[in-house]
Image: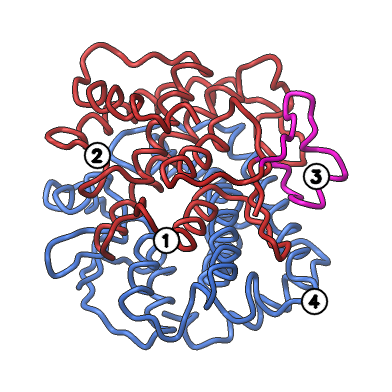
Chain colours: A red, B blue
């Protein structure tokens, strides 16, 4: 299998970190999203929705959403487990992956994509142009602050976002926090000691630089 | 296990249909979201995010996102399979569940929650009040029309959204279509023959009335 990839944005990073935690090295093909290569006719054949990453299997199957890619890798290479070791633990990890996608990732994306001048007309990923809504940028920013609060509360007395060990839920949440603070320039506010303790721990794992 | 449930909105319906397809009957506890019961202190102990449905397991574990609930049920009651029978098929089904959530469900929710007078101040589900953004309602409506187009294209020459048999991807897409046309009053436009053929077929399954 091979990964269509690009350094910088959060979504491919979530896959690279999972691969690193499993000690896997797959072929990577760079798709330069800064220059718009994801909109090329060639890449549209791989993913008509024009998003990166895409995992392409040896039989030609393509997978383009992060949780689907990561669950596929987990199924083929189960060790170490990153989606839990029981149905109940897996459910809590899946719940937090979803919560982080909707209330974290999408909130940062709303804040960034509806305000950055370079993303004018590109308020949503995909093949179609969508105009920015400035009020949505502001709302997204507020929602990111709520997400920080919720995650801090969840991490009270816990070392990991869900379950009893490092998981895909930690990968997703760390990548969203970094997306917020580095790309969207939304700083973690004062306080939130649980969030900051956990973030320092997960960011110190070797996989974080993948 | 038991399901906190309410008739009408799309999210609990996705779980009820999956249960019906598997021939399962679980205890259901009604949470009257019309009267705001999801914001009660009692329900916040079950789901602090104040969304319905919630699946509560016998050990007290609660699961509150639809795909996590449905995947859990699939794992405990695998027959008939509704998330595919191979890792590759499962990945395509997961991809379409994600695509439908982001580009279908959330688009309808944006259109509805940012415009309906009864949802003023409730533009996003959850415990916090969020003001409506009228421009986002309009954008959501446009995105729903794009989703209809994309789904029609995907269904060309296919009986099911993903994989070779009826799956969770069909359940998700049908529920979103019905959410759009009945609750948000966004009609399917002229044309789109594949979408309409598929919708008539999945809507005729006994589970559709669950």
Q: Residues within 10 Å of mark 2 (few under 14, many from 20)?
A: some
| Magenta-colored span | A28-52
Marks 1 and 3: same chain?
no
Asked if B45 appears above or below B73 in the picture, the reply is above
The tag on residue B157 is 4
Q: Is residue A167 left or right of residue B156?
A: left
Residue for badge 3: A43
Please tell me whether mark 2 or mark 1 is closer to you in this view: 2
Above or below, B155 relative to B64: below
Q: For the residues marked 4 and 1, what is the alpha-carbon distance in whole angstroms?
A: 26 Å
Q: What residue did someone put label 1 on?
A: B67
Between the residue at mark 2 and the residue at mark 3, the CA separation in whole angstroms equals 37 Å
Point out residue B48 in the picture as x, y percentages from the top left corner: 22, 45
Residues marked 2 and 4, same chain: no
Comparing A1 with A170, the one in front is A1
Q: Residues within 10 Å of mark 3 (few under 14, many from 20)?
A: some
Q: Quadrant of the N terminus of chain A?
A: bottom right
Which sits in the foreground, A202 or B96? A202
Q: Give the mark nearest the N terminus, 2 or 3.
A: 3
Image vertical order of residue A56 relative to residue A122, above or below: below
For label 2, the residue is: A160
- Give the SS element for disc 1: helix
Secondary structure state at the residue bearing disc 4 = loop
Cα–Cα gap, marks 2 and 4? 45 Å
């Amino acid at each position: 299998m091979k990964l269509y990839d690009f350094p910088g944005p959060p979504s491919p990073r979530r896959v690279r970190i999972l691969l690193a935690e499993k000690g896997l090295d797959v072929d990577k093909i760079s798709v330069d999203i800064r220059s718009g290569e994801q909109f090329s006719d060639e890449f549209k054949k791989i993913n008509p929705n024009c998003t990166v990453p895409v995992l392409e299997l040896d039989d030609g199957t393509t997978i383009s959403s992060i949780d689907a890619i990561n669950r596929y890798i987990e199924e083929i290479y189960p060790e170490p487990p990153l989606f839990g070791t029981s149905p109940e633990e897996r459910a809590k990890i899946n719940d937090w992956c979803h919560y982080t996608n909707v209330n974290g990732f999408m909130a940062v994306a709303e804040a960034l994509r509806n305000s950055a001048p370079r993303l004018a007309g590109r308020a949503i990923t995909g093949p179609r142009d969508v105009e920015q809504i400035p009020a949505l940028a502001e709302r997204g920013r507020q929602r990111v602050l709520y997400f920080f609060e919720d995650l801090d509360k969840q991490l009270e007395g816990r070392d990991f976002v869900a379950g009893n060990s490092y998981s895909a839920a930690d990968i997703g949440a760390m990548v969203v926090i970094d997306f917020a603070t580095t790309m969207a320039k939304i700083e973690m506010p004062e306080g939130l000691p649980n969030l900051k303790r956990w973030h320092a721990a997960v960011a110190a794992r070797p996989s974080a630089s993948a």
